[in-house]
Each structure stands twice: as structure tokens, then as C-alpha cells.
Image (tube, rainbow, N blue to C red):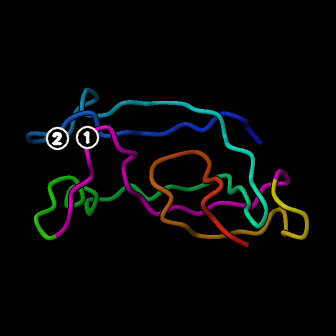
Amino acid sequence: MNSVNHQIRLAARPSGLPKPSDWKLTTEPVPAPGRGEFVVAIAYLSIDPAMRRLIDADYREPVAIGAVMEAGAVGRVTPRSIQGSRSGTTCTAGSGSRSSLAPTARA
């Protein structure tokens, strides 16, 4: 597993069609999991029209400027995880647009 976590963050609220300047690619280290936690390496990320409603939401708090863009994902539990967790287990998560989810998941 890569030790760098890539995220796509909202840089500006799009006006019309989204453009590259509306997004910012950031990186940070993948945190080591603590007791009872595990790391998920994201394999598939859902990019769909519903994301626009998350940016311009009037029915809930919209995604904040600078925040990781919300998205559904499918990933695998990594070998870097806690003892007893099943490395390679496939799972789904509301991870946001990032390459790894850690250590928010609990065993």
C-alpha cells in the first residue's frame, strides 16, 4: 500500500460546468491505525451528478471550500491494519475523494 493519501478538495464553488481550478489535489501521509482501527485502500470512487448537489446544497450544509469532496467508495482492508482484521476484505465507505481511508473505520 502507498503511504501517501491523495485527496481531491473543493477549491471554489463551480459556476456553470466545473473546471480544473475548482479542485485542488492534496497529499498527506496515511495515518497508522490505532487500537481497533484499520486502513482501507480505495480502489473505486463514485463520481456522479449527485455530487453537484453536495457542492450547492440548500437542503443541508454544503461541502466546505477546502474540504475533501464527498463521495462513495469501494476499497480493501490493507495489511497495515490491526491484527485480526482480514486483509484484502472488500468494503464500501463514504470516504470522500481520497486514495486511503484511515483510521476512521472501526473493527
Which stretch appears magenta? Answer: 60-80
Q: Residues within 10 Å of mark 2 (few under 14, many from 20)?
A: some
Q: Residue at x 22, y 32 (%)?
A: 19
User: Residue 65: x, y in percent?
Assistant: 25, 40
User: Residue 82: x, y in percent?
Assistant: 84, 61
Which residue lies under the disc numbered 2? 13
- Residue 3, above or below 62: above
In the displayed structure image, the side of residue 20 where residue 91 appears, left or right: right
Asked whether disc 2 touches disc 1, contact meaning CB atoms under 8 Å apart, the reply is yes
* Residue type highlighted by circle 1: Ile
Can you tell which mark lies on residue 92?
none
Can you tell which mark lies on residue 65?
1
Q: Earlier in the sequence, mark 2 or mark 1?
A: 2
Q: Quadrant of residue 38?
A: bottom right
15 and 63: which is toward the camera: 63
Q: Residue at x 62, y 48 (%)?
A: 100
Q: Is residue 74 magenta?
A: yes
